[in-house]
């Protein structure tokens, strides 16, 4: 039964990976838009232009999120975003406790590893690469 399930699900690897990439990319882009523009919601207003590290994190998140969602330069963009989330975790969350549940760093860890996965697995289906839709 497990082999049958593996065989059936294996055929959907690329489209499911593509949908995963699009969702992660859009969520990451929105995460950056909230920091930069206080849109679609405000979490204390937009970051002052050039402020370290909040404004720069927003720029990285918006650009990386859009690139990942579109499937352009997915591997390098995802690697940059993964590194940014690792940096965010170690500098902004870890000082408040060891565990992500304790220091409110779960989202940083999830984005870090979701983007890390995309950096190594590639964009999957529905990616815009070289001006054509990759299937």
Image (cartoon, rainbow, N blue to C red):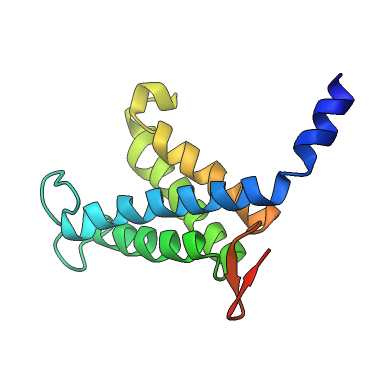
Where does residue 59 sit, x and y in percent of width and height?
32, 64
Where does residue 126 sit, x and y in percent of width and height?
59, 61
- Pick the residue in front: 10 or 78: 10
Q: Residue at x 21, y 68 (%)?
A: 50
Q: How many marks?
A: 0
Q: Check the image and name the residue furthest to the bottom.
A: 131
Q: Residue at x 55, y 49 (%)?
A: 19
The image quadrant of residue 78 is: bottom right
Left or right: 108 in relation to 7: left
Give the answer, above or below, for where 9 lies relative to 72: above
Where does residue 97 sit, x and y in percent of width and height?
37, 25
The image quadrant of residue 120 is: bottom right
- Pick the residue in front: 85 or 14: 14
Q: Check the image and name the residue furthest to the top.
A: 1
Q: Residue at x 30, y 58 (%)?
A: 58
Give the answer, above or below, for where 108 lies relative to 71: above
Image quadrant for the C terminus? bottom right
Left or right: 118 in relation to 45: right
Image quadrant for the N terminus? top right
Q: Check the image and name the residue furthest to the left.
A: 45
Where does residue 14 sit, x and y in percent of width and height?
70, 51
- Pick the residue in front: 13 or 113: 13
Q: Residue at x 85, y 35 (%)?
A: 7
């Amino acid at each position: 039964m497990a082999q049958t399930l593996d065989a059936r699900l294996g055929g959907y690897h690329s489209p499911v990976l593509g949908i995963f990439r699009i969702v992660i990319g859009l969520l990451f882009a929105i995460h950056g838009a909230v920091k930069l523009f206080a849109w679609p919601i405000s979490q204390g207003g937009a970051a002052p232009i050039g402020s370290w590290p909040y404004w720069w994190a927003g720029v990285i998140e918006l650009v990386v999120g859009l690139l990942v969602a579109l499937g352009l330069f997915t591997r390098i963009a995802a690697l940059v975003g993964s590194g940014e989330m690792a940096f965010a975790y170690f500098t902004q969350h870890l000082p408040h406790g060891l565990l992500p549940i304790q220091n409110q760093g779960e989202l940083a860890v999830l984005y870090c590893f979701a983007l890390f996965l995309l950096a190594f697995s590639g964009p999957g289906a529905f990616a815009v690469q070289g001006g054509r839709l990759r299937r």
